[in-house]
Image (cartoon, coloured by chain):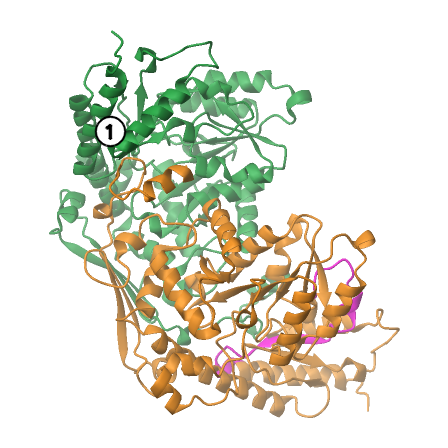
Chain colours: A green, B orange
């Protein structure tokens, strides 16, 4: 069938009775309007949130001029997405990461879960081993288990993966006992889920070097990339000369994609955290060979993303919409809002938990999560019996239940422990909760008041000095 | 992770810091408007097509009352889709097929390709054999080959699958040489792709009985179900008493789903042919056990369908939209339009090809396709050398190329031949082209003029008497 289409595409005047495509004159949708904030104000996000900021409308038409006609957006299309949308996002990637479609082609996805599960399937055969942060998002790490992929956890600290751990795993790998050496590293480099850590630039460079040395493919899953905090301020003269988008981009930490000379990075981006999760449309940058395989797999599984979302993206980034500069103004304003939320969380945490030493948090510089460390070694019933047989898990279960009974839900670390053959490596690191600061202030405050109280009771009953 | 969510869902007042969900106050979309035809006129489709019919607007709001708030539609959701949308489509299925969610639960899909590939994956292990029409849609039959599924073609005529062929395959199955007996029948029962055939009610009943006897699961892939022609007229007294939707539904041929007592039918429905292909949202009816598995697979692969489409469906079928009755008015009007197109195609075909006996077509009663039979036995170079070694394929290739050089593209039958181990069974039936009548009149007319001319040349050069 593909051979026939290719033949037809090369022959522009061909009259086709080949396809079962409904004609666009029969689409019962002639116009779609999305009401959105105007972004030419000082702080579009906070004005929008308060409900009285200026608005604008992205409009897609079937029969009038716009960035992407609904005649095209609402028809069947190729698995990689519509060329106009791919080009727009390719230009966006060039602004952000300095790479072009010649080395890194853009394929649309149905969001990061879809993108990643397709990559896992394309890159892994049953019995293969993939590398991953020792704590990661189980929605993704569980997905390829049914396909026979085994995960190998890489040790991490508050800044993410430890390059030394990565290198030593690869160096010590015994192919006789463990099969093929891992050829894929799956990582969430910014605002990591669940730890909230962000790989420093230095670590990124080291990891990329290790990837070159051991010929690893890096799956860079970066949904929180656009939510970075404590950045350098954007420079007004730069905005003047280069536009807001490019100037803002320079305040973000460089991605693995931006370092990639070999086509070994597959970068996966999302609108879920910066527009809406229900959009279910994202974009993948990969070398053209991988892009072709991703498109084939898409054509014979999910098909391309919906036209409503492609129309939205085209108008949003198009000449009558926000454009790339306006989009980054929205993102910048959203960063300010989340940074304020983070600071509010940390302030209330300090107030409610204080310096009693029962629990501490770091200061995440990206994303939506803090990784609360519970200092169980101070608990009277803590029993350290060697590195792999403590009662950390039991005590954390007990604390989780007490918190739940008290009325607050936090995600226990064990939910995120890498599903590898050997759970011993993470057993003593389960003394953490993932908490989000993405909610509203009242929720954060109420939850942390309970957390502080339950924590004191938990430790205090028989408090150690 | 799921265990934690379930715990949380049972505890309504819990304060959660568990999820990384952006708060809806930060969604930069407060309203979506879809401009659509009003359907309270005599023939909404033809008025809309001409561009001057009355219109209406489906509107979704984030902060105002509507069928499905954007606060919910644009957030993360469960893999099966939002409960409100599933309930709406479940009610719709009840109107059409008389089944409820107690026996056949509704799961949303990203369109039929997504639904089917998920079903193939859930129902088949490597080495399993599935039954299918001997000519079917290659986009689907190719999909599970990589997973090790083998296809077994069932013979068909202009009305679709021959029950005798189905029965004899199952009866003659030798598990020693061929492995497990097939347990899945994949079929497109209405306006079949590519043959355009529609299974008669009698055949549907026979096939369902065979399925019961041999314990087959029926995958009823029915994207053309709503496009049925030469139906009984809708009865005005019935409309008065039961509403338009239910009255219209009674003019449609009963589905396999409507006959299903055992939960062995998985029915897959689509908006692609009756709303727009780019919507990429459909619905699956299956027994609750299968529905649960479909949801799990969705949660660990594509995730749920996009919120834009769920919002659209909710408003379309909701109290301020078309509602089920109005939706069926649109569908009925669309049927009239496609029936007119079909008749136009057949009229021009008769004019251009006539009764010279070189090619003939049937009269499809559903869908978008006619299956043009080329009477190669009348061609002077036709060489019948036994049932499996004629030159049908070579002559059809030659004709395809002549048509293409003449400027018209038709889909050759060989594109659709079931990809089974043994292609012999379809070899002598490759003397067909699939043509669509879904396009505009001018295209149909221009294409058939060329088709008639090239056909006469092809046969006429050395025309047999």
Picture quadrant where residue A228 is located: top left
Task: Assess whether residue B430 is covered by the magenta stretch.
Answer: yes
* Residue at 38 percent of width and 84 percent of height: B46
Chain designation of label 1: A
Q: Is residue A125 above or below residue B48?
A: above
**Can you identify the residue that label 1 sits on?**
A231
Across the whole image, how many numbered discs are drawn on residues?
A: 1
Q: Quadrant of the N terminus of chain B?
A: top left
From which residue to which does the magenta span run?
B416-443
- Tell me: B214 left or right of A448: right
Name the one closer to the observer, A280 or B298: B298
**Apparent side of residue A3 relative to residue A62 in the rendered image (left or right):** right
What is the quadrant of residue B320 in the picture?
bottom left
Residue A259, quarter of picture: top left
Residue A194 appears at what percent x and percent y? 37, 30
Residue B286 in magenta stretch:
no
Q: Is residue B354 visible?
A: yes
Q: Is residue B6 left or right of residue B360?
A: left
Q: Is residue B347 left or right of residue B146?
A: left
Residue that appears at 50% across and 42% down? A117
Classify A117 as above or below B31.
above
Give residue A195's position: percent from left, percent from top: 35, 27
Q: Residue A215: where, in percent of width, then height? A: 57, 27
Q: Secondary structure at mark 1?
A: loop
């Amino acid at each position: 069938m593909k051979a026939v289409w290719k033949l037809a595409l090369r022959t522009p005047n061909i009259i086709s009775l080949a396809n079962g495509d409904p004609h666009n004159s029969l689409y019962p949708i002639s116009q779609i309007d999305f009401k959105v904030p105007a972004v030419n104000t000082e702080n579009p996000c906070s004005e929008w949130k308060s409900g009285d900021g200026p608005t604008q409308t992205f409009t897609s038409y079937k029969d009038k001029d716009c960035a992407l006609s609904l005649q095209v957006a609402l028809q069947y299309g190729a698995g990689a997405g519509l060329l106009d949308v791919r080009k727009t996002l390719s230009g966006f990637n060039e602004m952000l990461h300095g790479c072009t479609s010649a080395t890194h082609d853009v394929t649309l996805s149905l969001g990061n879960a879809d993108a990643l599960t397709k990559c896992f399937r394309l890159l892994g055969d049953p019995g293969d081993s993939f590398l991953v942060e020792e704590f990661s998002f189980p929605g993704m790490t569980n997905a390829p288990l049914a396909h026979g992929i085994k995960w190998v956890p890489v040790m991490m600290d508050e800044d993410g993966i430890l390059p030394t751990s990565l290198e030593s795993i690869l160096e010590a790998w015994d192919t006789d006992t463990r099969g093929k050496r891992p050829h894929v590293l799956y990582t969430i480099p910014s605002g990591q889920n669940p730890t909230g850590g962000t790989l420093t630039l230095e670590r990124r460079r080291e990891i990329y070097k290790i990837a070159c040395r051991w010929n690893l493919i890096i799956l860079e899953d970066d949904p929180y990339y656009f939510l970075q905090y404590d950045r350098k301020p954007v420079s007004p003269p730069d905005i003047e000369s280069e536009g807001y988008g490019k100037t803002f981009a320079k305040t973000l930490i460089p991605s693995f994609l931006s370092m990639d000379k070999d086509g070994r990075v597959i970068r996966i981006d999302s609108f879920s955290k910066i527009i809406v999760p229900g959009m279910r449309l994202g974009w993948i940058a990969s070398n053209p060979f991988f892009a072709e395989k991703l498109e084939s797999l898409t054509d014979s599984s999910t098909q391309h993303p919906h036209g409503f979302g492609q129309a939205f993206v085209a108008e949003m980034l198009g000449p009558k919409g926000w454009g790339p500069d306006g989009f980054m103004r929205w993102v910048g304003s959203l960063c300010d809002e989340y940074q304020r939320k983070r600071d509010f969380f940390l302030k209330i945490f300090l107030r409610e938990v204080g310096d009693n030493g029962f629990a501490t948090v770091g200061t995440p510089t990206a994303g939506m999560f803090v990784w609360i460390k519970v200092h169980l070694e101070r608990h009277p019933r803590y029993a350290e019996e060697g590195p792999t047989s403590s009662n950390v898990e039991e005590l954390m279960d007990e604390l989780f239940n007490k918190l739940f009974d008290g009325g607050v839900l936090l995600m226990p670390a064990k939910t995120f422990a890498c599903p590898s053959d050997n759970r011993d490596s993470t057993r003593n690191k389960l003394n953490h909760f993932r908490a989000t600061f993405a909610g509203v202030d009242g929720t954060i405050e109420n939850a942390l008041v309970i957390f502080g109280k339950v924590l004191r009771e938990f430790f205090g009953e028989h408090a150690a000095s």
